[in-house]
Amino acid sequence: MGHFGDYQNEIYLNGTRGVLPRWPVDFATLEARAAAALSPDVLNYVQGGCGDEHTQDENARAFRRWGMVPRMMVDCTARDLSIDLFGLKLPTPVFMAPIGVTGLATQDRHGDRAAARAAAMTGVPLVASTLSNDPLETVARDMGDTPGFFQLYTPKNPDLAASLVARAEAAGYKAIVVTLDTWVTGWRPRDLNTANFPQLRGAVLMNYFADPVFQRLLGKSPADAPAEAIGLWASLFGKVLTWDDIGWLRSLTRLPIVLKGICHPDDARRAVDAGIDGIYCSNHGGRQANGGIAAIDMLADVVAASGEVPVLFDSGVRSGSDVVKALAMGARAVGVGRPYFYGLAIGGAEGAVHVLKSILAEADLMMAVNGCPTIAALRAEGVRRTAG
Ligand code: FNR
């Protein structure tokens, strides 16, 4: 049976024929290449975060303060990175986190579809954002046999919320990921200094413009009245959700519901008590609050509070080693964010595939050399806090 780590052999063997990899395997070079490929506005929007960006930097840096102790004399010739999630058997513990400007990652402005094709090619699920340049139905079709999840920015209008969820269910998405931390946009100096907010320029609103309830509220076709359509979108974005809304959310769908943005163990416990199917520990990549605490430093407490309910994690994942550490800390699945966006920017769907394969290869090889052939073994081994 093949392993994700075999991607390394492929690269070295190509080298013996004089063929070098088209794209870098490390995050720093990847980001630099993407920076050269993207327009300044899109780059700022994606690369930037809140305030002085301390939290987003800390998200990545904090992984360095956690380490694994290698175990020897363990047969790791066969390794298993597959997971069960919401009744699905997934070949990898990695997924693509929702990124609302994925549509702008590629030159043709169909980056959402490219991400979906990357999901189809790798088996790595995509959490498709509400903010999309292509309707969620098209994105779902491009995912092929790989399951996808739909991320909901809950609109203030309940009929529109119900319509988006019903469309996602009909299109075959396997879970609804409700993002809690973004009913209002955090303070983002890079975007403010350039007065750039893509949605207000009409980008990534196709899920709304294609929606029958949105069209009814607008009273005309969004194509005939783009400025009015954007205005309506802005007036509807960002319902403030409270615990009282859980019953209503539940009434919208039979799909599993995941709450994204949970960092406090008490919130995790409350969500579990309310019957939520998945907890998604994330601080939005440091884009919402410049709070200072790295998401990975909150993961263990959230996992402990969530009991049997699966915990998804993202924020600061830059490598396979980060994935393995998050799994060892108890995450069921680990989200890659900015890295796959940069892959799309430099190589479209194939660039994202390369990024995902590189991350999976490193994760697989790290398990091999650390003596952990399974995720259960990783969890049993755990991580240690280091001085650095
Ligand atoms: C995001 N994120 C996000 N989250 C979400 O629930 N819906 C969305 O539409 C978006 N949009 C979005 C745009 C951009 C440009 C970024 C970088 C992020 C947050 C995303 O799902 C994830 O939490 C972060 O990307 C994790 O941080 P890192 O690892 O990418 O730094």
Image (cartoon, rainbow, N blue to C red):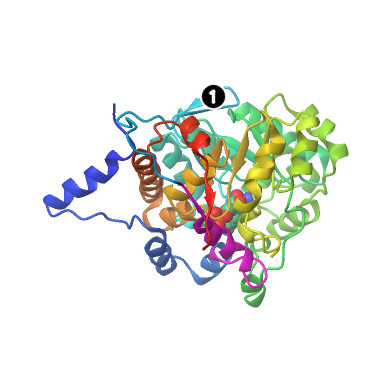
- The residue positioned farthest toward the bottom in the image shown: 193
Q: Position of residue 89 (x, y in %)?
A: 50, 24
Say if 181 sits above or below 169 in the image.
below
> Residue 23's image quarter?
bottom left
Residue in front for this viewpoint, 267 or 105? 267
Apparent side of residue 206 relative to residue 375 in the rendered image (left or right): right
Residue in front for this viewpoint, 294 or 334? 294
- The residue positioned farthest toward the right in the image shown: 244
The three-letter amino acid code for the residue at tag 1 is Leu
Q: Position of residue 360 (x, y in %)?
A: 39, 42
Asked if the beta carbon under badge 1 is closer than 8 A to the nearest atom of ligand 1, the reply is no
Check the picture and name the quadrant holding the N terminus. top left
Q: Position of residue 307 (x, y in %)?
A: 69, 31
> Residue 234's image quarter?
bottom right
Q: Position of residue 152 (x, y in %)?
A: 69, 42
Which range of residues does the magenta coloring cover? 47-68
Q: Residue at x 64, y 63 (%)?
A: 201
Residue in front for this viewpoint, 272 or 77? 77
Say if 193 sits above or below 311 in the image.
below
Q: Residue at x 58, y 58 (%)?
A: 59
Residue in front for this viewpoint, 330 or 85? 330
Q: Which residue is mark 1?
A: 88
Residue 303 visible (yes or no): yes
Residue 7 among those drawn in magenta: no
Residue 65 among those drawn in magenta: yes
